[in-house]
Image: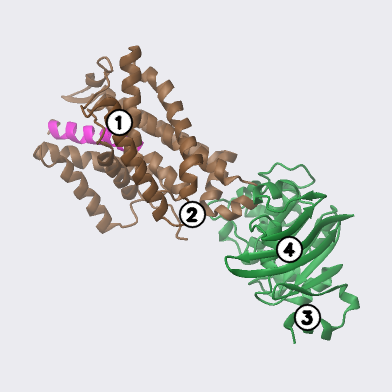
Amino acid sequence: MTLLRTRDLVVHYGDFQALFGIGMEIADGETIAIIGSNGAGKSTFLRSLAGLLAPSSGRIEFAGVDITGMPANRVVASGLALVPEGRKLFPSLSVEENLLIGGYAKRKGPWSLERIYRIFPDLKEKRRNPGTALSGGQQQMVAIGRALMSNPRLLLCDELSLGLAPIVVKDIYARLPEILAEGTSVVVVEQDIGQAMKVADRFYCLQEGHVSLAGKPGEVGRDQVSAAYFGV
Amino acid sequence: MVDWINTVLQGLLLGGLYALFATGLSLSFGIMRLVNIAHGDMIVLAAYLAYAVVTHFGINPFVALLLIVPAMAAWGYVLQRVVLSRSLTGSILTPLMVTLGLSIITQNVLVSVFSADSRAIPAGGVETAAVPLGGGVTLGLYPLIVMATAIGVIVGLQLLLGRTELGRAFRATSDDQETAQLMGIDNRLLYGLAMAIAMGIVGLAGVYLGIRANFDPSAGPSHLIYAFEAVVIGGLGSLWGTLAGGMILGVSQSIGFRLDPGWGILASHLAFLAVLVLKPNGLFPRTRDR
């Protein structure tokens, strides 16, 4: 069943047009990769889904409801959570408080502090530390855990690998199956194609605000992907 | 010697009033990055409201607090949702201009309603009662009550901010408003609540000011300066620092007055400048650079 559908989504930053009519569909339980180079519009797309940016035109339907233009605080309550680019932990809050505030919307579901600590055991011993005192990888775990605490049906992850060592990225991606096991749909946005394509059921490639290619990772050749990615 | 001890003690207790002036300012700046130029005028407004209630119904001003504090809190919520929220556009100048306008409006409304005469709130003798500590050292009962209230307010706020879900949401919003929205926090509602709490404390401060001293419609800005100074001396974001800042202002003021009646106010401003030169971030800074 379709969980998220966008139609002709157009987003501007002031006079600058960032997205030119994006159409995308994500089914329940699916893992989608959105790839594209710097400035292709990946983050803009995720931010408009999460309600941080109001689209100029087009439509976003989530779980059968039109959420176009809905403010971010209500979008998360309806079950769509964003792990923002750069993690964006709250420096005044401890690790545990960062996780707790993720559950602010009081949406019912399978996730709890205990569950998060079971997936990311490193966090339990650091739970009294300020979130920003952790290593980059651990901070990313807090950011993911914080988003999970809202019990999302759809989890959007913006550049999980940003600024992290490859081994740490691998470690974080290794926890994905446990999240998917709850039936959560996941969107991973990456500049690094390799990691994202490995976990994805389907992918979309963005280039300068357009979908330049879409398909299943196994069915598309490398050349096609590079052409769609770089526009050459 | 005993006189000097009394002077310092009076100054310390006076710090309680300044801390009450400053806490609301500190809160609205800390959570919303809103510098409220009308803060002093809101204190005077609360004092006039209390004056009107106390003289009209003939009740004790401490009983009037039960009316004034909720009324000011409600006013703060409405003010934030209807006016101030529109001024929080990312530029620090817009809220400055808007609250400056609010300050001018408040002063003029107070003049037309209450005239320019100075007033004081009659409190039935509490304001002059003394508590002798022996050896010639005495403390005023009223300043003690004010100080106890200030400490109570700060402890209460610390508990609210540190231990409750609402407090967590306040701190998260203060750190990063956009990411806080991603958590499901309605920042406009939260800002309204923050202003309600700040103005509730302003209500307390206004009534306490009105019992202690005369006030008139133009008195607001001079109280605003003390509030600013207490916040800056203590360090932005630190509530106990604000109390310490208030006490430093109070002690320097009463020592100044003791040396020469013309020096009191100057002395406290000089103490503020000295802290600004020696520790520009204040004594106990808590805010993080962003």
Task: Indicate left or right for A107 with B56 as reference.
Answer: right
In the rendered structure, the residue with mark 4 lies on which chain? Answer: A
Mark 3 belongs to chain: A
Q: Label 1 near label 4: C-beta < 8 Å? A: no
Q: Residues within 10 Å of mark 4 (few under 14, many from 20)?
A: many
Highlighted magenta segment, given as a residue range: B3-20
Label number found at residue B89? 2
What is the spatial separation of the Cα atoms under label 4 and label 1, in whole angstroms?
53 Å
Seen at 85% across and 53% down, the residue is A183
Q: Is residue B127 left or right of residue B28?
A: left
Given the image, on which type of amino acid does mark 4 rest? Answer: Leu
Q: Is residue B129 left or right of residue B29?
A: left
Pointer 1: residues within 10 angstroms few (<14), some, or many (20+)? some
Please determine whether, in this image, residue B52 is positioned above or below residue A58: above
Decide: is A222 above or below B11. below
Name the amino acid, label 1: Leu
Residues at discs 1 and 3 in contact (Cβ within 8 Å): no
Residue bearing the label numbered 3: A228
Q: Are marks 4 and 3 in contact (CB under 8 Å)?
A: no
The CA span between labels 1 and 3 is: 68 Å
User: Which residue matches tag 4?
Assistant: A9
Label 2 chain ID: B
Q: Are marks 2 and 1 on the same chain?
A: yes
**Residue B18 in magenta stretch:** yes
Residue B134 pos. (x, y %): 20, 22
Chain hosting mark 1: B
Checking the image for residue B110, the label placed there is 1
C-alpha span from label 4 to label 3: 20 Å
